[in-house]
Every structure is written in C-alpha cells, then in structure tokens.
Amino acid sequence: MDVLSDVLRVVRLSGAAFFTAECSRPWAVESPMPDMLLSKLGAEDGCVALFHILIDGECIVECKGLPPVKMYAGDVVIFPHSEPHTMCSHSGVKPIQIGSVILPASPESLPKISFGGDGEKSRFLCGYLNCNQSFRHLTVALPKMLVVRSRNDFAVDAIDRGGVRPANVTGGSRTWLGTTLKYTISEARNAQPGNNAMLGRLTELMFVEILRQYMHQLTENQGGWLAGLNDAYVGKALRLIHASPERNWTVGELAREAATSRSVLAQRFTELVGQSPMRYLADWRIHLAKQMLRDGPDGVGEVSARVGYESEAAFNRAFKRATGSPPASWRKKMLSAVASLGAIFLPLHGWLATLIAS
C-alpha cells in the first residue's frame, strides 16, 4: 500500500494556475492573505498551498520569520501553509497589491500581471494546490517553505523558522520532478487550447514528486507523519492500516505484523505521528467516510460498514464528534455547497479578479 498516494486520493488533491507575471526591476508584490484564499475557495484550514515557478530571470522571496530566498530560472517555491509573503527584485522595494496590476484575459487564457520599472525582467507562473479535506498529519509535517533548486539537480530545500535545511539527496535532471517542471514551464510559455487543464495536472504531479523527494531526504531524528512512512515499524503499521482500514486492528496485531513489540510500536508511532495507532485508525476512517459520502452513492449504513464500524449508530456518534454533524446532515451540506459553487463559479481569470479585489 502506497500510503502517500492513498491520502492524496482521499483528500483529492487538485492544482490550478492563478496567473502568469512579468515583472521588470525594480518590483515587489505581496501574496493574497491565507484567510481570503480559504474563504474564496471554500476550503478548510490546511487545504491550500501556494506555489510560484520562476520561468525566466531572478527574484527574492521574503516571508516573515524566515531567511530570504534567492530564486533563479527554473526554481520553484511552495508555501504549504499559504504563508503571507513578498516576491521582489531586491530587498527594500515597496510591495504592491496584486489586484492593482492584473490585466484582463480571455476565458481561454490565464490572467497576466505586468508591472515594475524598466530593468531586467522576471517571469513567473503562480498558482495553488487545493484538497477537499484537510489531512493535518501531512500539513504539520511540512516546513513553511519548500524550494526546488533547478541548478542543483532539482534538489528540494526545506525552510522554516530554524533556517534552511538543504537537501541531502538530489533528484537528477532525469527524474519525474525535472521532467515535469520542464513540461510545466513549456506550457506556461506557449498558450494553447487546453493550457489551463494541462497546467493544473502538471502542477499536481510536480507537488507529489516534491513531497516524495522531501520525504526520502528526511533524517532519522526528524519527526512527523512523512518521517513515519520511512520508519521500518511505523511505516509498516501505516501501510497495514491504509490497506485494511475496516479491519478491527489492535496495537498487538499491528506490532506482530510489523515484527516488533507492542510497546515499541506504540511509543515510536506516537513519537512520529503524534497520536496512538488506534487514534490514527479512527481518524483515518472518518477521512475515508467523508470521501465516500461526498463522492459516492452509498448510504450511511453502507459507508459505516465499509470503514469498519459494527453499527450505524456507533458510526454516527464518531462522525458527529469529528465533524460536528451527523453523516447524513454533513453529506447534504457538502452536496449543497458543491452545487452552489458550481452555479456561481467564474472562469479562473474572473474568479481571481474577484478574489484579489475583495
């Protein structure tokens, strides 16, 4: 069982491009605030990550509490927590709001931003990654910033309040990450029919590959869910839970399957994942149930059985504790929200203009 893929399937990761930008030195621009993004997208906290791909030129990225980052053509920066940030040609330039420089676009093309002085130009593709439900174990395991260095064989640097953690492995220009980035930049440079859809799918692939590379370079003393996937015992237990979430697991059974003792597994699992194996199992069942209720035709009773509950009443109580609503009410609310969003959804350029003008 590929646990990371299973999680991304259930939370339904999707990518989209906001706009392309051409900035002439001197320039500086501020990102939208996270609360505004979440509100406009109708997303839960922890469900939106921002990214910028530098197509041409150079720039500096500044984020409060973090060291400034210099980007070069082909680099990518991702903000997994949608941290407010500023992008600029150099420090000290007064930033402007995106809404004041966005240019009109046709429904078939991305919005464009063009501003600055008369100096050297930098070009970007900017967008976001969204999911239908928050999986906090993945979110809290990620740093404030992830930076892909194209000049260093597409290695992934992690940046947080402790500083920069350079990658201790490299991807190589022939990896999926390098290839995907090259295709993404090519699509951003050449507007064609289906361009928006292609960019969305390519950015999803890019993000998954960055996650995989970041996960594989985590060291033993770094905690978190992603580190747990690498651990011999915890990783095995996670794969068992995700392969058969409906099974009536006990810590002892998981430990036997993982070839360790009950006490070692319980302690190691809690240290890395942040909760006990049984608590994790219960939470994952709710994630699965939400996905089934939102996307499938099964009734509440069928869903409760599929995720491992012996009675519908027990499932109702557990679901209400986790979400604040019984499953039937939650499903009705979600389907109504999706229908409303579909009725009022604007083409991406119009939606962005509405977003940044708010």
Image: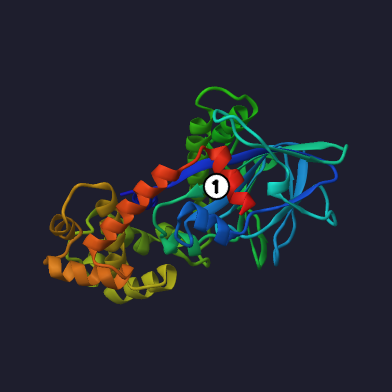
Residue type, label 1: Tyr
x and y, in percent, of residue 41 in the image = 48, 52
Examine the rendering and report whether any part of residue 253 can be seen: yes
What's the residue at 43%, 63% (across, down)? 137
x and y, in percent, of residue 329 in the image = 25, 62
Q: Mark 1 sits on what residue?
A: 128
x and y, in percent, of residue 291 in the image = 30, 53
Q: Is residue 122 above or below residue 10?
A: above
Q: Is residue 14 above or below residue 136?
A: above
Q: Quadrant of residue 62?
A: bottom right
Q: Quadrant of residue 312?
A: bottom left
Residue 339 as seen in the image, left or right of residue 326 = right
Of residue 182 and residue 2, the one placed in the foreground of this image is 182
In the picture, the quarter occupied by the C terminus is bottom right
Of residue 301 and residue 252, the one placed in the foreground of this image is 301
- Label 1: how many Cα within 10 Å (few below 14, some 14–19, many 20+): many
Count how many numbered circles sit on residues in the image. 1
Secondary structure category for the residue under label 1: strand
What's the residue at 33%, 71% (across, down)? 265
What's the residue at 81%, 46% (across, down)? 27
x and y, in percent, of residue 175 in the image = 53, 36
Examine the rendering and report whether any part of residue 169 can be seen: no
Residue 206 as seen in the image, left or right of residue 26 = left
> Residue reaching furthest right?
118
